[in-house]
Each structure stands twice: as structure tokens, then as C-alpha cells.
Image (cartoon, coloured by chain):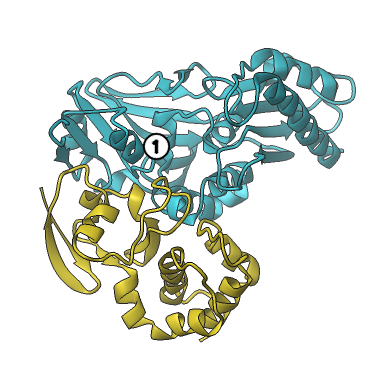
Amino acid sequence: MTDAPVFLAPTTLTEAIRAADDVDTVVIAGGTAMTLMLRERLVEPRRLLWLGRIDELSGVVATEAGVRIGATTTLWDLANDPTVVQRHPMVAVAARSVGNPRVRAVATVGGAVAHADPRQDLLPALLAAGAIVHLIGPDGPRAVPMADGFFRGFLETATDPGELVDSVVLPDAAATGEHYVRYTPVSDGDYPTVSVAARLASDGPTQGRLTVALGGVASAPVLGWTQDDGGVGSGGADVEAVCARVVERIAPFDDARGSADYKSAMAAMWTRRVVERLLLEAA
Amino acid sequence: MQVTFQINGDATTFDVASDARLVDTLRDAGLTGTKEGCGGGVCGVCTVLVDDRPVSACLYLTAFADGRDVWTVEGLAQRFPDVVDSFCTNEAMQCGICTPGHVAAVCALRLEARQVDDAALREHLEGNLCRCTGYQTILAAAREAIAR
């Protein structure tokens, strides 16, 4: 049994950055994940740095760069924000899929991003939406595209020690359709066995530009298909080619939610269903 | 650390560890209407209202409540006796362990004064589990309570 950590509750971002500059500090926002990790003694920090009193970190605003989602915005507020619902329905659906209303009322976007649990509903949706993670630390702010190596491994991200997630920006980009689907054989409130977020941009005769991201099928959220893989639809890659590429890129492991083989099969099946639906809607 | 918040309408100061959970603080203070079930935010038996919103007290640090307005089933039952009546007249319980959580969740809808259709009501109660009733009597009680 160790002493309880020192509790820090700064009210400004400047104070928080100063306080974060200590390796033995755990940053906590909504606390839905960290409360469990503290209780299980998976983390035993000397200090807890709570971001819940920093007003400037919360809220959704439309900017020229896209929709800016402050780190301490709750999943409830994200799922119900009119701009998010209209411009990024896939993200709103993913946020609404997490746990239950009590969890969504306190769990935060920045917490989900920083914690990087590969089973988290929100992450594949943000990844497929082209999210940019804005970090802030003692050396100033920097922006890391989520698709460009933000996720490093199980619960690991490109965030350096002493850095905090400031916000996530979803760039404006036209899409003909986007969907988030989750599959769980257990209860609806459970983590998904496999989740798929996909968006398609198609302008008439050209082949559709598709992005597919998956959750639950590797140690981190995975990009299964990007626009660099080529156009999709008539004249381009067919649905089976997309599914085959997705299965190559994921690295599922056996756990209580299914074997690795089962998850691969489910990843292919749910990718097929979502991409077929997107192509049908674009036709 | 010292944490002060309104509990069922009375400002109260608690001396707690920084990593104490609200469910433990409340139960240690004698407010045992709030139960602990799964301990992971899934089952809903520890549902309390913080600033009128239902939260899982097992996933909520007591320190977060500083300066806020917390209501447990004890206070809510006094404030909304008709919600309790709806649960009784609809026989919306068997073993009873989930009942405080369900009552708290329904009281949140009353405080919100939001008109909810059946789909929204089911979404609101989706994380309050009951292994006895099959939910129909609970939904009937909730519908009656929010119609008042």
C-alpha cells in the first residue's frame, strides 16, 4: 500500500503544462479509465494532474481548420454537438456507442486519445475522419496527424512525457458517406470485438477515395485502407481487394472477445458490409 | 485532502484520499442506498447525480465532486416521492439491488424536464442492468414517472 497521490487541479493550461513536467505524474480528465487503473494499482503515480477545472480545454468550435474538439469535451457533448452530428456523423455515432450515458457524461475525447485503448469506439472514427491531434508541452504546441504515427502501440502514443492533449481537429472534407459500425457478441455496453469506421468521397466519374480504420484488431487502432491504396469502386479496387488489404494490416490477438482468426474474419465481414453500403449510397 | 460539495442539498466536507471513489465516500458516510456492483461503470447500481447528470460513482473520484451538487437515492426519494411510488405500484423490482440506480436515473430525466420518447428512455436507461424483472415493469414505472 502506497500513499495516495498528490492531487493537482489547475484552472489554466499554463499551470497544467508546468505541473505536467514531472515523470511521476498521471494526467486524468474524466477518469473513467484511470480510476480503474488506479484501483487495480496498474499505475501508482506520485501525483494526479486533473484537467477537469480548465475551461479553455473544453468545448467544440468550428474553425477555418475544421472542427476543433477541446480535450476535456465529454463524449456526451461530442455525440450531441450539432456541428459534429452534421459534419462528422461517423464520429458522433462512435461517441454515442461508448458504454452508457453515465460513462459518456464524464469520459473525455482527450482522455480517449491519450489513453489509446485499441478497443475504444471513438479512435477508429477519428482516425478515418483524418483527425489532427494538437499537443501542448513545455516546448510549445505541435500537431500530429492521427494517421501519421500517433498510435505507437498498446496504450502508447506519440505524446512525449510532459505533453498534454490540447484538442483534436477534424478537417473539413467532403464525403459522400461515412459510417461507424461495431460488433460485439457480448452486451451492447461492452467494448467491440471489431469496429470499423469508413468514409468515402466520390465525385461522379472518378473512383471513390476510401478511408477505413478499425478498432479491436491490433494493439492500436489501425488504418486498413487509405486513399494512397487507390480508388475504390467501378474501375478501381473492388470490395474484396479492400477486405484483403484490411486483413493484411490488422494484427488481432486471442482474448475473451474471440480468437485472432475469428476477429480477422469479422474484420473482413464488417469492412465488406460497410464499404458495400458506402458504394451503394454513392451510386 | 478536503473535498466540499452539496450532498442531497447540504454542504458537506469530506476528508478523503485523492484517489478515493465517490461510491466509497458516500457509503462510508452512511449513504448506503448507493450500491457497488461491477465496479467498472457497466451495471448502474452506483448511479448518483452530479450537477443533475447521472454518473457511475464507482468511476468518479470524490475529488472531482468538489464544489458540485451531488444527489443520492436517499435525497432523490425525498425530492421525488412519486418516482418511488411509480416503482412500487408497477412492481418494478424483485431483489432490489438495481432499484436505487434506476430511481436515480429516472429522477435525472425529471430534473432535465426533457420530453423523451420510448427510444430515448431506453437509451437513457441502457446502462442500468436488472437481472430479475425483464425490464418491462421498470420501463412502465419510468414512463409513468416522467409523465407526471
A114 over A147 or under it: above or below: below
Residue A108 locus on image (x, y percent): 40, 43
Residue at label 1? A110
Residue drawn at 21 percent across, 28 percent down: A45
Residue drawn at 55 percent across, 49 percent down: A96
A13 over A44 or under it: above or below: below
Residue A18 locus on image (x, y percent): 16, 29
Tell me: A271 left or right of A166. Answer: right
Rendered cyan, the chain in question is A
Q: Chain of mark 1?
A: A
Within the image, what quadrant is residue A54 found in? top left
Image quadrant holding the C terminus of chain A, namely top right
Please name the color used to draw chain B. yellow
Within the image, what quadrant is residue B11 found in? bottom left
Q: How many C-alpha atoms fall within 10 Å of the one at disc 1: few (<14), some, or many (≥20)?
A: many
**Camera sees residue B116:** no
